[in-house]
Image (cartoon, grey):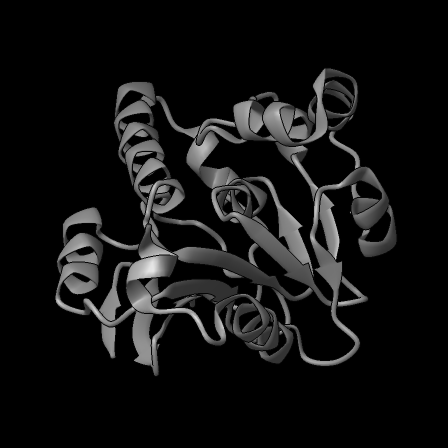
């Protein structure tokens, strides 16, 4: 296992598991939740990987940014941090792997932006979702608006971004925001989902 910033990553068979670990709500006190160079080096050192699961430790995936980050005057510093995080999420989005967010509990703001960088999202029944930044006078800064627009279309994406509302797992499934709702543990369901896609396939087939 490798720990970096507010995350850890380890391999379980051919699946990498990246876990957000920062308090009860897994707040993104560091928007770049894992150092990009550390992440890329670790992925390169594991050529056997066919998939990546991103999840949150404890009860929640992530409630997003620590709002105290927005109260300071160092806007240039925040912009630089967000730019580095956008780069990281673009790398995750373009990995030659199956990428799944296993979402437990709250998935808000930057947390949802991380989940949107994955190809698939498996949620627990009790999860809630929202791009809630507008409630704090800012907009999603990690590429979430663009990814949600591509996923849901303009109408639903605009409503979620401008209202800042939180929606349930069942509504998220109806919107098309998530792939499926787990009957039990969402991480275990994510592994089962990956198995359903990869069983009988070679690493070369999957990475192609």
Occupied quadrant, residue 38: bottom left
Q: Quadrant of the N terminus?
A: bottom left
The answer to whether 196 is drawn above or below residue 72 in the figure is below
* Residue found 86% across the figure and 44% down from its top: 174
Indicate left or right for 128 with 27 as reference: right
Image mark count: 0
Indicate left or right for 43 with 142 as reference: left
Q: Nearer the viewer, residue 7 or 151?
A: 151
Residue 36 % position (x, y): 21, 48
Residue 69 % position (x, y): 43, 36
* Residue found 68% across the figure and 57% down from its top: 106
The answer to whether 122 is drawn above or below residue 90 in the figure is below
Residue 120 % position (x, y): 58, 52
Q: Nearer the viewer, residue 41 or 111?
A: 41
Residue 34 % position (x, y): 29, 55
* Residue found 78% across the figure and 42% down from its top: 166
The answer to whether 141 is drawn above or below residue 68 in the figure is above
Occupied quadrant, residue 193: bottom right
The answer to whether 31 is drawn above or below residue 19 in the figure is above
Indicate left or right for 59 with 46 as reference: right
* Residue found 71% across the figure and 42% down from its top: 177
Indicate left or right for 77 with 98 as reference: left
């Amino acid at each position: 296992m490798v720990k970096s910033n507010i995350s850890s990553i380890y391999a379980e068979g051919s699946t990498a598991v990246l876990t957000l670990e920062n308090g009860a709500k897994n707040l993104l006190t560091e928007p770049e939740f894992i150092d990009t160079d550390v992440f890329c080096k670790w992925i390169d050192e594991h050529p056997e990987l066919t998939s990546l699961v991103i999840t949150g430790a404890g009860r929640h995936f992530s409630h997003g940014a620590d709002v105290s980050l927005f109260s300071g005057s160092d806007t240039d510093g925040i912009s630089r941090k967000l730019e580095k995080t956008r780069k990281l999420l673009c790398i995750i989005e373009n990995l030659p792997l199956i990428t799944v967010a296993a979402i437990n509990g709250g998935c808000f703001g930057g947390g949802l932006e991380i989940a949107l960088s994955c190809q698939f999202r498996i949620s627990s029944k009790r999860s809630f979702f929202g791009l809630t930044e507008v409630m704090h006078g800012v907009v999603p800064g990690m590429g979430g608006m663009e990814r949600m627009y591509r996923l849901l279309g303009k109408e639903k994406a605009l409503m979620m971004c401008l209202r800042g509302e939180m929606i349930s797992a069942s509504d998220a499934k109806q919107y098309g925001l998530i792939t499926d709702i787990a009957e039990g543990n969402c991480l275990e369901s994510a592994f089962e989902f990956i198995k359903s896609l990869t069983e009988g396939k070679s690493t070369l087939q999957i990475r192609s």
